[in-house]
Amino acid sequence: MKKSFRRVFTPIIGILLALCLTFISLAMPASEAKAKNVILLIGDGMGFGQMTAARIYKGAPLCMDEFSCTGFVSTYPHDPVEKWVTDSAAAGTAIATGVKTYNAAISVDGKKRPVKTILEYAQEHGKATGLVTTTRITHATPAVFAAHNPNRDAEDEIAADILAHNVTVLLGGGSRHFLPTNLKGKRTDGLNLVEKAKSMGYRYVETAAEMAAVSSGKLLGLFKASHMSYEIDRSATEPSLAQMTQKALELLDDDPDGFFLMVEGGRIDHACHAHDGAAAVRDTLAFDEAVRVAFTYALQNRDTLAIVTADHETGGFSVGGYGQYCFNPEILRTAKASFEDVIAPQLNEKNFQELLARYYGITDLTPEEIAAVRLGFEKKVGAIALAEVVSRRALLGWTSSAHTGNDVPIMAYGPFAEFFTGRLDNTEIFEGMMAAFGFR
């Protein structure tokens, strides 16, 4: 009876097991498969604190929480002066090239020699490429993928270098570094790189509507002279980071050899430098919407690896602070504008109470808060002092107005995603992308 049972049911069990394994293999990307496409999303300045605050503010999980593989990344530079704490240029170079370098270096090593980037490797293999950011396209993080320069501040030179790399899709701010001074740009060499881009076959756009109308080919979109607006300040004429990501994917998807795309939520960092918790959280959520676009694409295209990480943490951002076991996100929800771009340009020692009432609805400043803001003006940091009044009420903590050396998160989904788990160094992100593409 027992032998008969085995003869009948063992094949059935085997068939069921095979069906289960087949279902699992369809549901999950194959770890041994190579990636045709890689989407790298970088939340500039985004640490675990920024993610936690955004999740609480939203009242629901982030898309970043849905990734199948997670870990944490060390970010320190190879810099004898700025020990352990990186800037975006050195951190971005490590991610883009796998090489540690000094702060301010744009994909050059410690001896200022150019180092090949993942974008350049992708182009060598016939893949389309894209860079999308809410900062200037010439700013450190996008620059490291398609330029080489010993100084991140040489943005006119970087603009020419990025254009010479013939990146398929370029979307962000920074038109001032593409235009000469007589056209309200900053270039003193007289070059008009926008016209040069058009001669190279790029469609050039300046608004969300113009971008939406492009359906194929190479695209250069420069939506502001400098950085794009914070999400809290953005008007409908500027595309969101998610919209730019969607358009980039639509265009890059046309290449039969695949693509490499880098997407940066660049102004999370700027908000944290300014101690503007509301702007930081809103930009983190806007970045997460771009992550949602990329994640959806990866779910629909099983040959796509999506990676989410940060170059460094900014501000020493903490949920809870000032000796209290609490966090009040409702204070941040009252914000109507950013400190850096909207409040600070209007701010002076006489009108700070009026501006705080207008943009935050706060009309009951205490004598201690007023004194703290006035002291901030004496130290020439009035905007940060006013922002810290909001932070203290929200119980949102800061340890610095600069970067920190804290580890940052990493999440991955798709072919080779398992590589990006546990503890990694930022140079290993490059190695993982190279292996996923099959370039190693």
Image (spheres, rainbow, N blue to C red):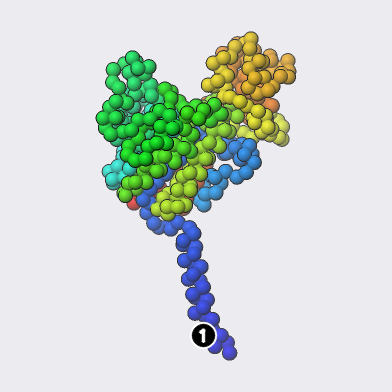
Q: Residue at x 55, y 49 (%)?
A: 66
As displayed, is residue 246 above or below residue 336? Answer: below
Q: Residue at x 36, y 18 (%)?
A: 185
The residue closer to the viewer here, 105 or 234, is 234
Residue 140 appearing in the image: no
Count of marks placed on residues: 1
Residue lying at 52% horizontally and 40% vertically, measured from the top left: 289
Locate residue 325: give its quadrant.
top right
Foreground pick, 261 / 140 = 261
- Residue 176, image x, y percentages: 38, 21
Q: Is residue 21 visible?
A: yes
Q: Which residue is mark 1?
A: 7
Which one is in front, 250 or 188? 250
Residue under the point 57% across and 35% down: 50
Residue 14, image x, y percentages: 49, 75
Q: Is residue 360 left or right of residue 228?
A: right
Q: Amino acid at mark 1?
A: Arg
Residue 218: % across, % down: 32, 37
Q: Nearer the viewer, residue 408 or 241?
A: 241
x, y percentage for residue 101?
Answer: 38, 33
- Tell me the quarter of the picture where residue 87 sits: top left
